Amino acid sequence: MAVWTNNLNYLVMDNGDFAYPASVDWAVRDFEHNSFMAWMAAHFNDPLARYADDKLAQCVRYHQIKNGDGTFVGTSANPGGGILFYREAVEARRTAIAWLHWANADYPTGTITAPTNALMNNTDVSVIHQRSAFGNFSVSYATASRNSIMAMIDAASLNVPTNTFIASRRPT
């Protein structure tokens, strides 16, 4: 709960996925945290996790529909080849675990709260992250041991799940 309360809940975007600060994003979005969000919602009754779980479930299902063959991740996770099968298996397992959390929920219903404005400065990892109604912004700033600066901007989703795949990284 301490990690969720002090860190991870600040990274929840309006589509339910976590922002990956400083552009360490997987593919375009693979919505891989659905089992974690279901656990936080079903067993700890967290209103933000309940919101995120609902949005992630919509996005995972929409991905399956858009892929046309029922796959969870699809070809977007395979730009270099060789990892698609593993990513599919991981997503299938996490989705099954999410279902099991809800099938055995301590809190099957509860309050739902959308993400609100947040600012997080993690000096230990040199990342600043801001969430607002307009989207998410993060910057990983240079330190004595790392000379690169990376940033990521995720605009707010226009519609979940149909118009939420809008982030990409720009190498420096």
Image (cartoon, grey):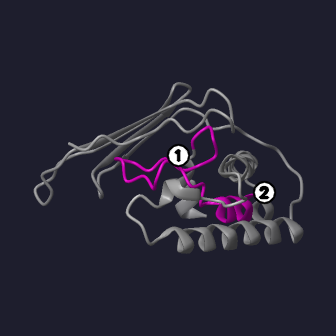
Q: Is residue 9 visible?
A: yes
Disc 1: CA contacts within 10 A as few (<14), some (14-19) or many (>=20): many
Query: Residue at the location (88% across, 69% down)?
Result: 103
Q: Is residue 20 one of those drawn in magenta? A: yes
Question: Height in image: 39 above or below 59?
Answer: below
Q: Tell me the magenta residue range.
A: 13-41
Disc 2: CA contacts within 10 A as few (<14), some (14-19) or many (>=20): many
Q: Is residue 147 toward the left or the right of residue 42 in the image?
A: left
Camera-side residue of 89 and 58: 89
Q: Which residue is mark 2?
A: 45
Question: Height in image: 39 above or below 65?
Answer: below
- Image position, residue 143 (x, y; %): 15, 52
Q: Amino acid at mark 2?
A: Asn
- Image position, residue 16 (x, y; %): 64, 46
Q: Is residue 27 one of those drawn in magenta? A: yes
User: Dividing the image into 4 quarters, which one contains the C terminus?
Assistant: top left
Question: Height in image: 14 above or below 105?
Answer: above
Query: Residue at the location (81% across, 72% down)?
Result: 100
What kind of element bears circle 1?
helix
Camera-side residue of 92 and 109: 92
Q: Is residue 7 visible?
A: no
Q: Which mark is residue 124?
A: none
